[in-house]
Image (cartoon, rainbow, N blue to C red):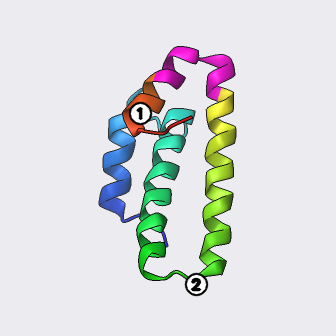
Amino acid sequence: MALPKEVKKEVISKYQVHEKDSGSPEVQIALLTERINQLAKHFQVHKKDFASRRGLLKLVSQRRKLLDYLKSNKIDKYRAIIKELNIRK
């Protein structure tokens, strides 16, 4: 279940650091958050979809690692993205 192109472009343009940026930690965290939210809606309907649940856990873990990296290197950007994406910690 990938993100639609329009949604992906919108998220990238909102969080990119410079014009051609598509891989900075901020963009990656925003894209992962979008996919996690999409999967959360999926699980409200399909409660027994355990294969996708495993994928969700992998996405959450990947996002956690990126957030830890951001926290150790750019604390101000970490706080901003946590607040903007409503990720609680």
Q: Nearer the viewer, residue 54 or 26?
A: 54
For label 1, the residue is: 16
Q: Nearer the viewer, residue 63 or 9?
A: 63
Q: Main secondary structure of the magenta part?
A: helix
Q: Quadrant of the C terminus?
A: top right
Can residue 17 be spotted in the picture?
Answer: no
Residue 80 vertical placement versus 20 (above, below): above
Q: Is residue 28 left or right of residue 86?
A: right
Image coords of residue 2 (percent x, y):
47, 68
Name the residue: 41% across, 29% down: 83
Sequence-earlier tag: 1 or 2: 1
Name the residue: 68% across, 31% down: 68
Residue 76 vertical placement versus 3 (above, below): above
Q: Amino acid at mark 2?
A: Lys
Task: Estimate how packed mark 2 is, as few (under 14), some (14 to 19) or many (20 or more) residues with alpha carbons within 10 Å.
Answer: few
Residue 18 vertical placement versus 27 (above, below): above
Q: Amino acid at mark 1?
A: Gln
Image coords of residue 29 (percent x, y):
53, 42
- The magenta stretch is 70-79
Q: Is residue 58 left or right of residue 11?
A: right
Element under disc 2: loop
Q: Nearer the viewer, residue 70 or 48?
A: 48
For label 2, the residue is: 48
Image coords of residue 74 (percent x, y):
59, 17
